[in-house]
Image: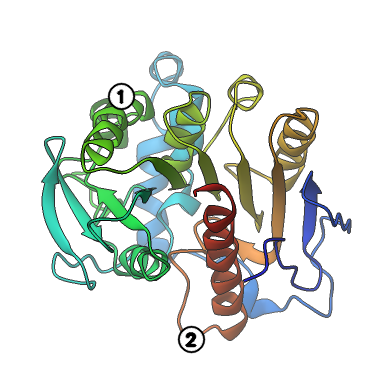
Amino acid sequence: MNEEPNLLPGAVLWGRVGLVRRSSYCCPSDTCNDALRPSIFSLSQLVPFLHRFLTPSASHFHQISEEERKMSSSQCFENPPNLSSTCGAGHVEELAGLKTYVTGPSDSKRAVLLIADVFGYEAPKLRKLADKIASAGFLVAVPDFFYGDPIIDFTSPNFNFEAWFKNHGTDKGHEDAKPVIAALKSKGVSTIGAAGFCWGGVVLVKLAGTEDIQAAVILHPGPMTEDAIKAVKIPTAILGAEIDHSSPPEQLKKFGEIMSAKTEFESYVKIFPGVSHGWSVRYDDDNELVVKSAEEAQEDTLNWFLKHVK
């Protein structure tokens, strides 16, 4: 497999891994069409969402973190998966007190931790990616960081995102990940990589500021700060979407420049044209171009681990 990230037409890449190709942030006319534009919510979905997040008083919003405001973007909830507790080639076991989907050779010295988006560890396409990484010889763990409480239907009038985020903030996810990493090491694992998606990407950038893991891939992350990027200590790839309100390309470019200034490890930022936040594990199977983009992002993820988790 190639160690360098692949590039679709119109892709944007910044980093310290060799080839650097620049292009406009705008989706080129020959690579983008209406099928690739972000999906539009029906009125029945949009009205209750806007009611919950636009009607509270100003004092209420002062109590909500900037991270929470950005993660309440409708993009974080588009194309929700049909969760399944039985999908995948692996099995569920308890790891550091958390139910965890585990797949791959149990005696492997190399492990990969996958940190889900707000839909949690039972997402079929996330487990499919876990199985793909496992087939390359990694022991892969996908913990249930939401303790059986993923977001299932954000349009429900009974759903309160503020309350959910209070119980499942990224700081708590970061703390919960530490004993999971320790549990993997207790199984004989010597090197660990991690990939994080949206909510999981914010958790992962915190882990990347430690030496608990050896490599990171952050995919269409939730809101991250420049300070968090400046603290990164390990080889890190950020795979972003051209159409992303949580982490727009302009911001990811800045993150790439910050990481590129560090000579002690490799890093890059890659923007995928014509796709929206969440596409790598919540893609539409009927959209050939988006599927191809998701497959490329997953291949880039695997290649990063093959290169840096040895």
- Residue 109 versus residue 291: which sits nearer the camera? 109
- Image height check: is 52 above or below 197? above
Where in the figure is residue 163, as x and y percent of width and height?
24, 29
Q: Nearer the viewer, residue 22 or 188?
A: 188
Q: Nearer the viewer, mark 2 or mark 1?
A: 1
62 lies above or below 45: above
The residue that appears at 45% across and 82% down in the rendered structure is 285
Q: Residues within 10 Å of mark 2 (few under 14, many from 20)?
A: few
Image quadrant for the N terminus?
A: bottom right
Label tally:
2
Q: Amino acid at mark 1?
A: Glu
Depth check: 256 or 47 in front?
256
Is 12 placed left or right of 97 in the picture? Answer: right
Q: Residue 50: percent from the left, percent from the top?
A: 42, 44
Colouring chosen for the image of the structure: rainbow
The residue located at (50%, 38%) in the rendering is 214
Q: CA distance from mark 2 to mark 1?
A: 38 Å
Is 225 on the left-hand or right-hand side of 262?
A: left
| Residue pointed to by mark 1 | 175
Q: Amino acid at mark 2?
A: Asp
For residue 20, side relative to residue 265 (left or right)? right
Where disc 1 sits, the SS reads: helix
* Residue placed under numbered mark 2 in the picture: 286
Please report whichever mark, 2 or 1, sits nearer to the chain's N-terminal start.
1
Above or below, 139 relative to 36: above
Pointer 1: residues within 10 angstroms few (<14), some, or many (20+)?
A: few
Secondary element under disc 2, as helix, strand or loop, is loop
Q: Residue at x 61, y 39 (%)?
A: 235
Q: Does the rendering let one see residue 207?
A: yes
User: Which residue is at 43% across, 60% downward?
Assistant: 78
| Residue 80 in picture, x, y percent from top left | 35, 63
